[in-house]
């Protein structure tokens, strides 16, 4: 290509339009904003200046909380249809904001406050959010009796990142946090989920929280005091091997997260449910009967895959943002559940035996 000098790298374009590179990759996958040029040798994406207006509009729509299915119509539909969608979204947003404000004020009124500092420093609200997202992946009480380690959350401390990991063998949740400072060598330890939830409830209102790890154990510091953090002496499953060995995704489904959650909840918990996707629709079925058909952006061949709703619903609840992305390699392999709004959180969910996929 002769005019690549006029193009910008994904990093430069991301800074220019106020989007993360991970979001630009996501929008490329979703057919919302393709790069102007992709280097065949390196796979690097490049963008042209005349794509800036579209990228900024995508960002503004997403900042307004608009589902990607609606945002695509605003971007590419007629003016009349775009106005109708924007006005309806604004109405829903006003109703949601009023309900959320009341609920948040009630919650905040009962939370403690304070300040902490130590070797590893994290934002307290971010830590609390991470615990909320990974804790549902911890095993049930009955499974913990046989495998105590599945009742724990693995905390890994590295130079640039702190990770929280939990699994019950049917799903895996990984949340990465960016610490404000880290001193010392990388380490890891296990904490019981009940203890970690207790810490999260205290940390949510804190500007930062400190964790100190040494040969004597793990401690939390702050507000002029410190407390020991009980740890568990077990070997956590090798989750990295699972992530590294995931097959390439053949199917991608993007849909309104709340709508998918409501459809699955409406299907009930009496046995597996089936998700079927074609080019523009996602159908949720129970016992062979369709419960809901939702607008969706689907890439790859049509696919049908079955889940235990009791496993899939918590994965949807743990996400953030208006949309959910399902990356499926096959109806028998773990499915990646994630969001364009938070690349730092990944959930794997195991499907269950069901009807064979239609491809």
Image: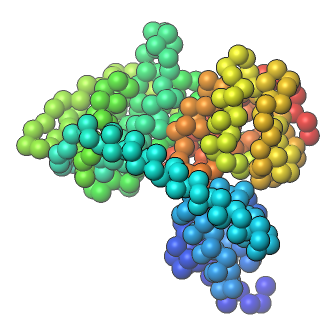
| Residue at 58% over, 24% down | 169
Relative height, residue 306 to residue 27 (above, below) = above
Q: Pick whichever, 70 or 54, lies toward us.
A: 70
Residue 334 coordinates in the image, percent (x, y): 68, 34
5 on left or right of 209: right
Residue 93 coordinates in the image, percent (x, y): 55, 55
Relative height, residue 204 to residue 61 (above, below) = above
42 on left or right of 189: right
Q: Pick whichever, 206 or 218, lies toward us.
A: 206
Could one spot residue 76 in this view of the protein? no
> Which quadrant holds residue 21?
bottom right
Could one spot residue 92 in this view of the protein? yes
| Residue at 13% over, 36% down | 226
Residue 142 coordinates in the image, percent (x, y): 49, 10
The quadrant the C terminus occupies is: top right
Q: Pick whichever, 161 or 214, lies toward us.
A: 161
Instruction: Report the colour scheme.
Output: rainbow
């Amino acid at each position: 290509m002769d005019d690549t000098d006029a193009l910008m790298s994904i990093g430069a374009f991301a800074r220019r339009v106020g989007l993360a590179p991970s979001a630009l990759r996501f929008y490329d996958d979703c057919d919302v904003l393709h790069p102007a040029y992709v280097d065949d040798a390196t796979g690097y994406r490049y963008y042209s200046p005349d794509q800036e207006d579209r990228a900024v509009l995508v960002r503004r729509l997403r900042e307004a909380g608009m589902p990607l299915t609606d945002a695509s119509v605003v971007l590419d539909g007629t003016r009349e249809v775009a106005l109708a969608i924007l006005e309806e979204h604004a109405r829903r947003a006003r109703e949601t904001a009023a309900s959320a404000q009341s609920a948040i004020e009630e919650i905040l009124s009962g939370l403690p406050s304070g300040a902490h500092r130590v070797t590893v420093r994290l934002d307290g609200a971010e830590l609390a959010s991470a615990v909320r997202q990974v804790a549902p992946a911890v095993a049930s009480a009955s499974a913990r009796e046989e495998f105590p380690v599945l009742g724990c959350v693995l905390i890994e401390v590295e130079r640039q990142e702190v990770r929280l990991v939990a699994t019950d063998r049917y799903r895996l949740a990984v949340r990465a946090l960016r610490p404000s400072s880290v001193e010392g060598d990388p380490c890891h330890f296990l904490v019981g989920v009940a203890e970690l939830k207790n810490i999260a409830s205290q940390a949510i209102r804190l500007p930062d929280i400190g964790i100190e790890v040494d040969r004597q154990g793990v401690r939390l510091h702050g507000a002029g005091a410190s407390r020991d953090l009980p740890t568990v002496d077990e070997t956590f499953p090798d989750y990295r091997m699972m992530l590294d060995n995931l097959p390439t995704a053949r199917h991608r489904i993007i849909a309104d997260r709340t709508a998918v959650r409501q459809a699955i909840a409406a299907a009930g918990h009496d046995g597996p449910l089936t998700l079927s996707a074609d080019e523009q629709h996602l159908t949720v079925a129970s016992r062979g009967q369709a419960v809901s058909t939702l607008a969706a952006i689907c890439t790859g061949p049509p696919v049908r895959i079955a889940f235990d709703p009791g496993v899939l619903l918590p994965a949807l609840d743990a996400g953030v943002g208006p949309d959910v992305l399902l990356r499926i390699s096959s109806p028998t392999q773990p499915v990646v559940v994630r969001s364009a709004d938070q690349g730092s959180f990944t959930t794997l969910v195991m499907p269950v035996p069901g009807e064979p996929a239609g491809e």
